[in-house]
Image (cartoon, rainbow, N blue to C red):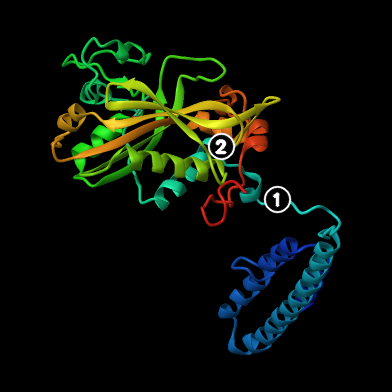
Amino acid sequence: MSDLQTLESSTLTAIAGATDETALEAVRVGALGKKGTISALLATLGKMSPDERKTAGAAINALKDKVNEALTARRTVLKDAALEQRLASETVDVTLPVREAASERGRIHPISQVMDELTAIFADMGFSIAEGPDIESDDYNFTKLNFPAGHPAREMHDTFFFEPDAKGERKLLRTHTSPVQVRTMLASQPPIRVICPGRTYRCDSDQTHTPMFHQVEGLVIDKSAHLGHLKWVLEEFCKAFFEVPNVKMRFRPSFFPFTEPSMEVDIQCRRSGGEIRFGEGEDWLEILGCGMVHPNVLRNCGLDPDVYQGFAWGMGIDRIAMLKYGMPDLRPFFEADVRWLSHYGFRPLDLPTLAGGLSA
Ligand code: DAH
């Protein structure tokens, strides 16, 4: 039996010497695993005579129990030690500043913010949102909007054209959001009340123009919508958007092929020291174009101009964002510089609502 004693002492020494749970597990496998030393001894029992088996079996099983006990005891010691060590090393320094969550650190781009503001204002007046593709047909961008072929107004749009396709059709990047008016009239029946925010493109670049920019279109069609309604809608919009109790507006005659009469709208402001304030002052600033939808446009979109009438307007989103939030240059809007965004951006959880405030 001295073999058993040697095995016992060597196994218990190994258990006592295991310095972590992985080492201890290796000792356990070496003794009690399928090919372990004690398991090998147990396997010899089968070949013994019944008398031999009685004594040897009892002795080997006693060894097995002892080893198991020692393993359990050692495991507890190691676990406790590991926990102690973690507690000692993972201290929390409560004097450190709180780290901002990602949802707190991120910023909403001023364009997205202004689109959300526009949506909140016009949704409150009963408008819904309509969208169309950036790549448009010449027909929707120009022809159906009453731009005759060869009309100089087409040239004024600095259009990006694609190569003609197999059928000779030349697609383009929409130069304004007005084709969404066409799509809306073709797809639905009056009464129509939509705004259409989105990307637009013209070959132009300087401090206040970028080749890609944003517009929002408005369209109201029913049997009685008139200029008075248009003025009210725009006035309410300007007061809500610029967050002032009153704003004077000036409607100047203008020309757009898709409206008759057409107007450009200026709003009252005060310019002083590079700053602009709205709702006060003696200066005027142009902010949008509008008019009554031209009968030809209604007809082109399947509506009878003797039954239906309505008004529309179009406005540069980037421009009104620059005016409202005092951003002097349009180009950094699209440079993806986080320093600019953290300065001019908006907190992601402060959603603009009329009740809670648009920009506060
Ligand atoms: N589409 C015009 C532009 O991009 C803006 C515009 C003017 C839209 C008058 C309208 C409108 O709907 O009625 O310059």
**Along the horizontal axis of the image, is 263 left or right of 223?**
right
- Residue ID at (70%, 65%): 25
**Along the horizontal axis of the image, is 292 left or right of 351?**
left
Label 1 or label 2, whichever comes before in sequence order: 1
How busy is the neighbourhood of tag 2: few (under 14 within 10 Å), some, or many (20 plus)? Answer: many
Towards the viewer: 30 or 86: 86
- Residue ID at (28%, 24%): 141
How many discs appear? 2
Under circle 1, the secondary element is loop
Amino acid type indicated by mark 1: Glu
Q: Nearer the viewer, mark 1 or mark 2?
A: 2
Residue carrying label 1 = 100
Amino acid type indicated by mark 2: Pro
Image-quadrant location for residue 283: top right
- Residue ID at (74%, 74%): 71
**Along the horizontal axis of the image, is 41 left or right of 217?**
right
Q: Is residue 258 above or below residue 35?
A: above
Residue carrying label 2 = 110
Under circle 2, the secondary element is helix
Quick check: which quadrant has ligand 1?
top left
Towards the viewer: 218 or 259: 259
Towards the viewer: 166 or 292: 292
The percent coordinates of residue 338 (x first, y second) are 64, 33
The percent coordinates of residue 314 (x first, y second) are 38, 31
